[in-house]
Image (tube, helix red, strand yellow):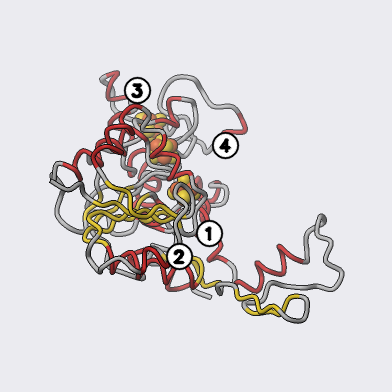
Amino acid sequence: MSKPKLAYYLAGGCAGCDISIVDLADYLVDVLEAVEIVFFAPTLVDIKYQDFEALPDGSVDIGFFSGNIRNTEHEYMAKLMRQKCKILIAFGICASLGGIKGLVNLYSNQELLEKAYKNTFSTDNLEGVLPEPKCIVDGKYELELPELTSVRTLDQVVEVDYYIGGCPPHYHHVKKAFIALLEGKLPSKGSWITMGHAVCEVCPRNPVFQERPKEYVKEVKRTIEGSPEEGCLLEAGYLCLGPVTQGDCGALCPKVNIPCRGCGGPLPGTKDYAVSAMNTIATILENKELINKIPAPVLLFYRYSLPGSALRKKIKK
Ligand code: SF4
Ligand code: SF4
Ligand code: SF4
């Protein structure tokens, strides 16, 4: 029997998701034996876009797309991956909801370019040159670059079959996802591949494990003030998003005294992650004055999901 063919593409991401596959360690050997990798760009396999374009449409069984859509090349590759792959997975929170880099949507591309190429202390750009989609180098070579767009999620460009959260997805979870894929035990189309438990449910700090109810938050604190080694971080005032986030990471951050920031993605049935996070935090604060003490609320609630949120439409530039 022929092995399932696998394609992987990294768009607007940091390659951390690629590393989460390498992190499969000994199970990686089983994966490499079980699948035939036909495309893995630009990180692991030296392959050209033309080679992938030449494959028959629908001939690849599983496609992983990591990173968000930040420019016209990513958009082209998203469409090509959709055309070639029977199953297309938004792999990691960048592809699924936009990721932390999706916060650039708070600014226009012009503002960002001005900041990055002109208005920083370390920039040496006396002529104020900004990157252009087309330019002539040495008076004779035409150089064409992809054009920047606003950050979009994969499903804002093509239809997505499954989503996997995490920044990057935890390797234990990646292993479970591969097992589900290779054994054909997938949830319904359009679902997140997740065990469906919140971070709180797998967090050893959860007061439920001490058989007592949760307490209201009496003050808002920042981790820079030093976070406690025991007890629920949210109760202590550190705005932990564990109650509304998929816990496929096994509560990695609270286990090392850091509040969950929501990279795992929304719990099943959630329409808008940030709205769900705001609702939950608002209901657990002891008084409404504490809302004004939340430092940088946009960065807290929309940290990983701004492009995929309902708010995106309001602030699109
Ligand atoms: S989800 Fe995180 S690890 Fe993956 S590409 Fe985006 S920033 Fe990198
Ligand atoms: S709120 Fe955070 S620290 Fe508290 S139980 Fe949930 S995940 Fe753990
Ligand atoms: S605890 Fe939250 S922020 Fe940390 S890895 Fe897990 S889901 Fe991501």
Q: Are circles 2 and 3 on residues that touch, CB within 8 Å?
A: no
Q: How far is mark 1 from mark 3, CA to CA?
A: 31 Å
Q: Secondary structure at mark 4?
A: loop
Q: How far is mark 2 from mark 3, CA to CA?
A: 36 Å
Q: Is mark 1 within 8 Å of ligand 1?
A: no
Amino acid under label 3? Pro
In this rendering, would 258 be left or right of 205? right
Residue on which the image places disc 2: 69
Amino acid under label 2? Ile
Does the rendering let one see residue 260? no
Comes first in the chain, label 1 or label 3: 1
Instruction: Looking at the picture, tell me which residue is in the foreground, 7 or 102.
Output: 7
Residue drawn at 44 percent across, 56 percent down? 47
Q: Is mark 3 within 8 Å of ligand 2?
A: yes
Does the rendering let one see residue 208? yes
Q: Is mark 4 within 8 Å of ligand 2?
A: no
Residue on which the image places disc 1: 103
Residue drawn at 34 percent across, 68 percent down? 54
- Nearer to us: label 2 or label 3: 2
Rendered position, 201 above or below 272: above
Amino acid under label 4? Arg
Tell me if mark 3 has few (under 14), some (14-19) or many (20+) residues whose alpha carbon lies within 10 angstroms of its own.
Answer: some
Amino acid under label 1? Leu
Percent coordinates x, y for residue 203 in the rendering: 34, 27
In this rendering, would 314 be left or right of 163? right
Residue on which the image places disc 3: 204
Tell me if mark 4 has few (under 14), some (14-19) or many (20+) residues whose alpha carbon lies within 10 angstroms of its own.
Answer: few
Comes first in the chain, label 1 or label 2: 2
Tell me if mark 2 has few (under 14), some (14-19) or many (20+) residues whose alpha carbon lies within 10 angstroms of its own.
Answer: many
Most distant residue in the right direction: 126
Q: Secondary structure at mark 2?
A: strand
